[in-house]
Amino acid sequence: FGDQLKNGTTMSAFTIERGFMDQSVPSYIALRGMSVETMNLEISSKDKIKGSFSFKGTGFGLGTTALDASPDAASTTPVMAANVNFARMTEGGVTVGAPNFIKSLSINVNNNLRYVEDISQDTPADVLDGECTVTGRCETYFGDKSLLEKFYANTPTSFMFAVTKANQTCVFQIPRATLNGGGNPQATAKNTDTMASFEYKASLSQDGTASHVVLDRLEYVEA
């Protein structure tokens, strides 16, 4: 049943190599000991799903010989977008619908990495991990007071959304999220909708996953 990624305690490090192929003799920069520090995922209505990552590493190298003589071809995986590729969206375990439609949602993961410095070396000696902090925000139509009540009462909720394209699916989950910012519904002008924006912070889930953020990847699905 596909495979699953979630925050844990095992550090992973790898090498990223950049090749500048337009040069008469291509140059290659190898970035070693790279670990992911942050991941930011943005989902907004009528837009592509966008993600970005930042890394910390322990060294680099410059040369004219590639580490991999036969690199993988560029990915042909199609871009996923909000609206057209959403299979399902839930908040608090209930499918999102009228009147509190969610217009945008973000997930921000920070592993709080830190360098180990050695005065005898010109690059960090190591990279250590810290706590995994998962935060984000969501913007909803203010159709009733149900989500605002959770904000006022500090009641944990959850978010789950599944995106599907070309018979492949990614399911993202925030099993336990507490709304800790925003919560000020307002309309900005005449003939505009009243919106409610919230910030959230994830905590250790109580549903058995023992995680803050979970991604299930399914290589093949049928509608």
Image: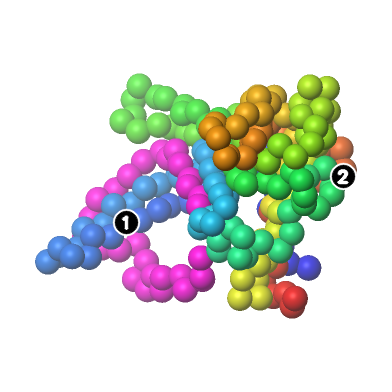
CA–CA distance in space, label 2 to label 1: 40 Å
**Left or right, 77 with reference to 71:** right
What residue would you read off at disc 2? 208
Whether the magenta-drawn stretch holds residue 5 is answered as: no
Kindly identify the residue that appears in the image at 52 percent across and 39 percent down. 38
Q: Is residue 153 above or below residue 17?
A: above
Q: Amino acid at mark 1?
A: Arg
Q: Is residue 172 above or below residue 154?
A: below
Q: Quadrant of the N terminus?
A: bottom right
Kindly identify the residue that appears in the image at 51 percent across and 50 percent down. 51
Measuring from the top left, give residue 109's x and y in whole percent: 59, 38
Measuring from the top left, give residue 135's x and y in whole percent: 63, 34
Density class for disc 2 (Cα within 10 Å; few <14, some 14-19, many ≥20) is few
- Magenta range is 50-79
Q: For numbered disc 1, what is the local secondary structure?
A: strand
Q: Quadrant of the C terminus?
A: bottom right
Whichever of labels 2 and 1 marks the residue nearer the N terminus, that label is 1
